[in-house]
Amino acid sequence: MDKMVELEMTTEGSIAVVTFKSGCVSDVEAISTAGRQIKAFIDENHPNRLIFDFGEVKFFSSQVLGLLLDMRAKLQRGGGEVVISAINPQLHRVFKITNLDKIFRFFEDKQSAIKTVSTG
């Protein structure tokens, strides 16, 4: 049985916000589908900043890291940036262990991420 990854995708000016609405993001097919949806959203809206909001996520598989890296590469080609907001401390440890904390900026919540990235 496929588990859907619930996403909410919005824009605030030139900033796109992808909010994960699922507590667990681990189903391989669902993550692949979410990746395609996010890529289509980026292609349609052309944001120069993308915020991934993890406020509701309690667990994710390593495939999510690949998704984040893919989106980062896609935005960097156009001089853009991917940032992460509202990630819980246990999940943030995954970024530290893999040294990905050095390539992404992290924000306490979505609002502070929007405020900071919109001012440059």
Image (cartoon, helix red, strand yellow):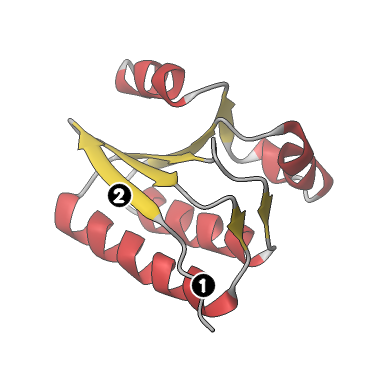
Relative vertical location of residue 97 with respect to residue 62 in this rendering, above or below: above
| SS class, disc 1 | loop
Quadrant in which the N terminus is drawn: bottom right
What kind of residue is marked 1? Lys
Circle 1 residues within 10 Å: few <14, some 14–19, many ≥20? some
Q: Quadrant of residue 6?
A: bottom left
Mark 2 secondary-structure assignment: loop
Left or right, 98 with reference to 115: right
Q: Which residue carries the number 1 mark? A: 3
Could you say which quadrant of the image residue 99 lies in?
top right
Question: Residue at position x 25%, y 41% from top?
Answer: 10
Q: Nearer the viewer, residue 42 or 79?
A: 42
| Residue 64: % across, % down | 59, 60
Determine the residue located farthest toward the front in the rendered image.
1
Q: Position of residue 59 (x, y in %)?
A: 69, 52
45 lies left or right of 117: left
Viewer-nearest of discs 1 and 2: 1
Given the current orientation, which residue lies at the most extreme right position?
97
Q: Quadrant of the C terminus?
A: top left
Q: Earlier in the sequence, mark 1 or mark 2?
A: 1
In front: 20, or 75? 20
- The answer to whether the residues at label 1 and label 2 have Cβ atoms under 8 Å apart is no
Q: Residue at x 62, y 56 (%)?
A: 24
The quarter holding residue 89 reads: top right
Numbered badge on residue 114: none
Question: Which residue was labeled with disc 2?
Answer: 78
Does 106 sit left or right of 75 as displayed?
A: right
Q: CA distance from mark 1 to mark 2?
A: 32 Å
